[in-house]
Image (cartoon, rainbow, N blue to C red):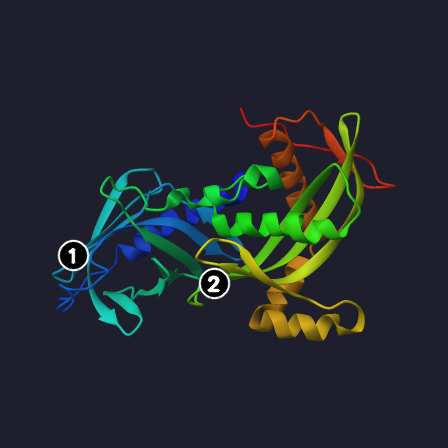
Amino acid sequence: MKKRLAILLSFAMVLTFAFAACGGGGGGDVSDSKYVGTWVADSMSFAGETGDFDNAITLVLNNDGTGTFSGVDEEGNPEVSDFTWSLTSDGFKTAGDVKLKFKEDGDAIVAKILGAEMRFVRADENGESEGESGSASVDGAAYGYGGDDPVEAACYKYMVETVGKSFDAAEYSIPTVNIVHEDFTPEDEVLVYGDFWVENYNADGDTLKCVSGGNFPGCMHVSKADNTVTAFDQVANGGEFESSAKEIFGDKYEDFMKVYGDSDAREENRKITVSDYVNLNGLEFKSYQDEGWDPVELYPAAE
């Protein structure tokens, strides 16, 4: 998990230079715009992965149509770029060599940059992102989720509390969430497309023995109001698998099939999640094991 977040953050630093090319003429009359103020980047999605920021990238929109973008370069040095901005029918855009369009996403704004989607939230008077404690609505540690994205945490919780309950009771229930794509464009919800798994375990010494589980690919509907899963469109089994998957995933079907068919990546994600579950909850397990397979050694807790 830490590895993929690091990759996303490095990618974001490269984007700083792309954005630095912005410039140009005046942005028109935006003095009464609701977008005026300071925004901080709190997450970015790219190729099915989502990473969180720690207020490292700041967007300031002034009421005269000017603005600044603050980040850091590849060596960690501060970088500040000036730009102009103007309103659009569903948000605003920046002017210059690199044209960026920002759209509303509930109380946030999002922009597509070189294939990545960056999400900004309004900063409070101290420059910190407002509502960043919203992820506390779901205790990620209880489900093996080590991040702080409330949307992702909701998916982990749903797999355990709803899907996992369809199996016989076990001591531990731990999901594996392989996200293909997140769509923030609906007004009231986030659509999370992925290959979702849940495995249930019983303790056997210092090993978690898997006793049941299953695979549930599809699309989860996560409410923007309270970060709960309100619906789950599941891909059908058997002969209807392909047709239902194409219907649910649409133009992301090929991306889904790449994720669905990559067993090595899935097992690595499972190992990370089970390790996070054990380490976040202070448990003493050293490995997990499927019936008929060798035990898989868990990652140790980060020092």
Coordinates of residue 235 in the picture (x, y in percent): 69, 67
Coordinates of residue 296 in the picture (x, y in percent): 75, 35
Disc 2 designates what residue?
Answer: 189
Image point (61%, 52%), residue name: 158
Image point (16%, 56%), residue name: 62
Q: Quadrant of residue 290?
A: top right
Coordinates of residue 49 in the picture (x, y in percent): 53, 52
Q: Secondary structure at mark 2?
A: strand
The quarter of the picture where the N terminus appears is: top right
Tell me the kind of residue under disc 1. Asn
Tell me the kind of residue under disc 2. Glu
Circle 2 crowding by C-alpha within 10 Å: few under 14, some 14–19, many from 20? many
Disc 1 designates what residue?
Answer: 62
Q: Nearer the viewer, residue 72 or 102?
A: 102
Q: Are marks 2 and 1 in contact (CB under 8 Å)?
A: no
The CA distance from mark 2 to mark 1 is: 29 Å
Q: Quadrant of residue 76?
A: top left
